[in-house]
Image: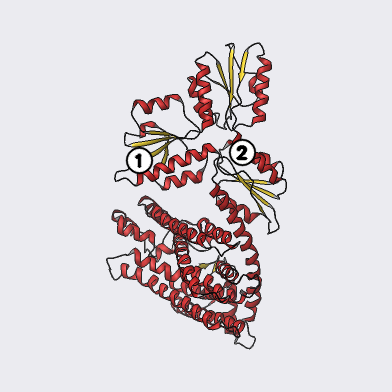
């Protein structure tokens, strides 16, 4: 079960900072000549926000020398010193102050007391590098950097206070109990002096901690979201971990890694909270990812068991030994997949039927078997040697052959691969016919299933012909629209649209809703393929189970390549030194990676992919009939966005 505290999400200071920057962004982007927007230092301890702003061309800068009068400066939530404000005013630079209200009040108190001849003591976090928290550094700038900064009780003994009047304040996110103990010790040591202690710790983090601890007591695990350098997040983690095992993450990727390493199921109680800079959207995304993972883990185990059992049924002792050997090879590769298509088919069926039975399982197995079959064909087309971490079927045959005639061995190995791939297609058909022959929806299911196959093959035709046209036929165009159509036909139809909609049809859903689902899962499928193309170049070959040089050697037409071809011609000559090369080395791959980064192709592909994922999310949120499965679908999208294979 999932638990989220009563109070969670950004504190008022974080919300103010985010509102200021996004409102400015919307204002400027509507102008004909928008100003450049920058943030002086890091707006918040939130890498996700920083990354999103970077994608919007809003960057954090560390020097005011980098700006001019055509720049808008935003002062970060942690606050800045007085001299920064003076510089901006003197140079007539437009700026907006996103400093937390509580921090501003601390600045006012320090400034006022300093000019009244007080010694200033700031209680704040000391960093590992010997410096201090960003907020502390900014506060120190309001007393001409003359404050005495201490982080713990032991440092009080080394204080050297000369003046009779002393002001003691705290970093707003400092642990309140620790701050009170430090202040009490200062009062005892300097009891003859006038000590004015003002507790400037913020109530926001305290309330977040209070309600997080309430749910931690009934949870098996607590997930704490926040920046690695966030003091209040570290405090929140420390407190929760004393109550129940807790993990601290700053993005969904880290959460998914933890989920894969942890023995959890639907009966596990998991609490989710976050530091003061964490947005509510991030909390919800973590919840959705966990809900998807638990559903996926359960369904995957069921599908794996059934498909392993069904694989054995493919074998017939009456068959010739050569055929039996071929089927054994097929069975070996018809396992160990991600089973995403089965999961989508399951979701489609459960959403449309309102049932939680296993009626969909044979159809899911047929889809997995179909996928294995076309991947065998795909491996032959691409001359691939690895798939799912194993040797491809043609490769296995080549190793098995004792003949020294390499050319003939290759032809026969590929021919056998084609035969086995064809066999798999009809084994998939056989699963459908045997299990649904008496079902009233059989004709609709077969009609749609065939449509999926036909569209997939059409996409494969485009995929095969496009690189040949450009490389050998000297066709002078590389249309992004052709590549997007290929993604739609080849990937979206058999990866996302087909499985989900087949599940709906199995439940006898009406045609109008199927049309709407096709639009949603088209966007999702195309985004899936763009992600695949990025992983195909930038992934870890050991992790993804296939080489990362294959797209390059095959002259694959991807959105990365088309962007360079159509928009960054100056990089094309260098790219062609490696793209289409027969024996692509690791250093060649590294050069291609650099070209895609420097030309902006990688950034363009990611932006296109993210827009499609975001559009899918918007469309799914519009459906009112998804019930508990809405979060699972949204979690699936989050998973597809962060996956590394």
Q: Position of residue 193 (x, y in %)?
A: 63, 12
Residue located beneath label 2 in the image: 234
Residue at 61% across / 61% down in the picture?
628
What residue sits 47% from the left and 37% below the top? 42
Identify the residue at image location x=51%, y=67%.
Answer: 386
Q: Secondary structure at mark 2?
A: helix
Name the quarter where the N terminus is drawn: bottom right
For marks 1 and 2 on the same chain, the one whose residue lies earlier in the sequence: 1
**Residue 583 visible in the shown view:** no
- Residue furthest out toward the bottom: 318
User: Around disc 1, counting alpha carbons within 10 Å, would you say few (fewer than 14), some (14 to 19), or many (20 or more)?
Assistant: some
Q: Quadrant of residue 31?
A: top left
Q: Nearer the viewer, residue 384 or 156?
A: 156
Task: Work out whether 523 lies above or below 58.
Answer: below
Q: Which mark is residue 36?
A: 1
Q: Residues within 10 Å of mark 2 (few under 14, many from 20)?
A: some
Q: Work out whether residue 109 or residue 292 is closer to the camera in this orientation and state it.
A: 109
Q: Give the number of the mark in front: 1 or 2.
A: 1
What label sits on residue 347 in the rendered view?
A: none
Residue furthest to the front: 624
Q: How is the image coloured?
A: secondary structure
Q: Give the answer, above or below, for where 211 lies relative to 152.
A: below
Whether residue 75 is visible: yes
Q: Secondary structure at mark 1?
A: strand
Q: CA distance from mark 1 to mark 2?
A: 34 Å
Query: Which residue appears at 38% of the width and 68% of the height?
Result: 485
Q: Disc 1, disc 2: CB below 8 Å?
A: no
| Image coordinates for residue 307, horizontal then vertical, percent | 63, 74
Residue in the foreground of this view, choosing between 329 and 107: 107
Does 390 sit above or below residue 225? below
């Amino acid at each position: 079960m999932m638990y989220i505290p009563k109070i969670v999400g950004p504190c008022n200071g974080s919300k103010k900072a985010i509102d200021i920057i996004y409102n400015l962004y919307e204002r400027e982007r509507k102008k004909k000549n928008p100003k450049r927007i920058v943030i002086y230092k890091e707006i918040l301890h939130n890498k996700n926000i920083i990354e999103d702003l970077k994608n919007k061309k809003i960057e954090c800068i560390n020097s005011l020398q980098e700006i001019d009068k055509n720049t808008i400066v935003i002062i970060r939530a942690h606050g800045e010193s007085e001299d920064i404000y003076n510089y901006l005013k003197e140079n007539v630079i437009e700026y907006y102050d996103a400093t937390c209200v509580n921090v501003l009040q601390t600045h006012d108190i320090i400034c006022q007391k300093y000019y009244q001849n007080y010694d200033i003591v700031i209680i704040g976090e000391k960093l590992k590098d010997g410096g201090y928290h960003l907020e502390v550094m900014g506060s120190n700038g309001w007393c001409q950097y003359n404050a005495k900064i201490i982080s713990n009780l032991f440092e009080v003994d080394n204080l050297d206070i000369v003046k009779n009047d002393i002001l003691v304040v705290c970093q707003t996110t400092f642990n309140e109990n620790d701050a009170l103990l430090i202040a009490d010790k200062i009062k005892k040591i300097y009891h003859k002096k006038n000590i004015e202690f003002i507790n400037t710790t913020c109530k926001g983090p305290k309330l977040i901690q209070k309600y997080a601890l309430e749910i931690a007591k009934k949870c098996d695990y607590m997930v704490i979201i926040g920046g690695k350098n966030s003091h209040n997040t570290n405090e929140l983690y420390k407190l929760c971990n004393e109550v129940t095992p807790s993990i601290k993450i700053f993005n969904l990727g880290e959460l998914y890694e933890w989920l894969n390493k942890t023995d959890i199921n639907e009966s596990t109680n998991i609490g989710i909270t976050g530091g003061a800079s964490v947005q509510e959207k991030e909390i919800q995304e973590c919840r959705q990812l966990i809900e998807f993972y638990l559903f996926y883990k359960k369904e995957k185990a069921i599908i794996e068991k059934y498909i392993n059992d069904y694989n054995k049924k493919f074998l017939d002792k009456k068959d010739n030994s050569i055929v039996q050997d071929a089927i054994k090879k097929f069975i070996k590769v018809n396992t160990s997949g991600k089973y995403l298509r089965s999961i989508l088919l399951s979701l489609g069926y459960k959403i449309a039927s309102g049932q939680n039975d296993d009626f969909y399982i044979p159809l899911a197995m047929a889809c997995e078997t179909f996928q294995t079959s076309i991947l065998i064909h795909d491996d032959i087309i691409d001359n691939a040697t690895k798939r799912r971490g194993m040797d491809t079927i043609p490769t296995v045959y080549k190793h098995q052959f004792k003949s020294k005639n390499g050319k003939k061995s290759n032809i026969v190995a590929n021919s056998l691969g084609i035969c086995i791939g064809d066999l798999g297609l009809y084994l998939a058909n056989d699963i459908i016919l045997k299990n649904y022959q008496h079902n009233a929806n059989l004709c609709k299911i077969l009609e749609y299933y065939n449509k999926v196959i036909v569209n997939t093959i059409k996409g494969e035709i485009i995929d095969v012909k496009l690189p040949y046209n450009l490389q050998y036929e000297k066709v002078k165009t590389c249309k992004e629209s052709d590549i997007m159509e290929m993604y739609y036909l080849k990937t979206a139809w058999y990866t996302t649209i087909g499985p989900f909609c087949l599940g709906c049809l199995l439940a006898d859903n009406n045609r109008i809703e199927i049309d709407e689902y096709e639009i949603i899962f088209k966007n999702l499928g195309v985004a899936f393929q763009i992600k695949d193309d990025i992983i195909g170049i930038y992934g870890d070959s050991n992790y993804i189970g296939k080489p990362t040089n294959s797209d390059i050697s095959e002259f694959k037409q991807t959105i990365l390549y088309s962007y360079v071809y159509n928009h960054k011609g100056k990089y094309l000559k260098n790219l062609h030194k490696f793209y289409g090369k027969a024996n692509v080395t690791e250093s060649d791959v590294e050069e291609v990676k650099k070209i895609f980064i420097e030309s902006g192709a990688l950034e363009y592909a990611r932006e296109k992919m993210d827009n499609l994922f975001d559009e899918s999310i918007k469309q799914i949120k519009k459906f009112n009939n998804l019930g508990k499965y809405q979060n699972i679908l949204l979690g699936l999208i989050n998973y597809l966005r962060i996956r590394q294979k």
